Image: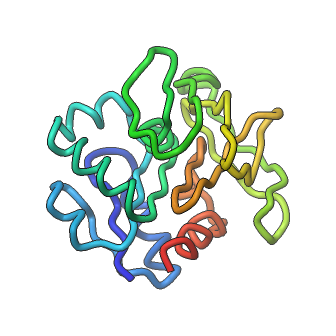
Amino acid sequence: MKIGVLALQGDFDAHRKTLEHLGAEVELVRKPEQLDGIDGLVIPGGESSAFLKLLGELGFQKLGEFVRTKPTFGTCAGCILLAKDVENPAQQGLGALDITVRRNAYGRQNDSVILESLTKLEGGPLEQVYIRAPRIDRAGEGVEVLAERDGYPVLVRQGKTMAATFHPELSDDTRVHAEFLKLVR
């Protein structure tokens, strides 16, 4: 099983380390053609509009083809890219998840916080690291909510696609990445 981590910006190396710790072979993806050789993809946090610029039209198109056919997991900005609808401001999404996401809904960098909340994942409360996090304002039918914050979904799954509004790669808790690897298997 080879997992790609989109390595254009964000803490892609933290995702790589977590996935390798869980036994996955990891490839850092910097070019669209690398998507052909992987079984699943993680889109890390960062700035979603910068991702769009760095990917370019061809890269965004290739990424869209990938997420429609193979397991993908997006965190923070990756969640925004996977969304059907993006607000604050409006932005193009890949439409892989039937969710509406509001960018930077929890405030600025100095509003960053680490919380714990209940989750449907086994093992008790889940540590969640929020940094300029988006908020999922709407989860459509078929979207399973795996964790919430203040009544809003923060970890979701629909089919072979997962997204988190927080940064599980910055926690010692590996359950979110392990759950993604189950989708890839």
Q: Residue at x 75, y 50 (%)?
A: 147
Residue under the point 57% across and 59% down: 159
> In the image, is residue 96 above or below residue 185?
above
- Residue 134 position (above or below residue 11): above
| Left or right of 92 in this view: 71 | right
The percent position of residue 178, horizontal first and vertical second, equals 59, 73
Say whether residue 79 is left or right of residue 120: left
Viewer-proximal residue among 75 and 95: 95
Q: In this figure, which colouring scheme has been used for the structure?
A: rainbow
Residue 161: x and y, percent? 52, 56
Q: Quadrant of residue 14?
A: bottom left
In the image, 13 versus 178, the foreground residue is: 178
Q: In which quarter of the image is the N terminus?
A: bottom left
Question: In the orientation shown, which residue stands out farthest toward the top?
Answer: 89
Seen from the viewer's position, the closer of residues 67 and 22 is 67
- Residue 3 screen position, x and y as percent: 37, 72
Which of 109 and 165 lies nearest the eye of the viewer?
Answer: 165
Residue at (49, 25) in percent of width and height: 86
All told, the count of numbered labels is 0
- Quarter occupied by residue 122: bottom right
Where residue 140 appears, as percent x and y from the top left, is 66, 38
Give left or right: position of 121 versus 44.
right
Extreme-front residue of the structure: 141
Position of 156 with respect to 31 (left or right) is right
Q: Which residue is drawn at 69% across and 43% down?
A: 141
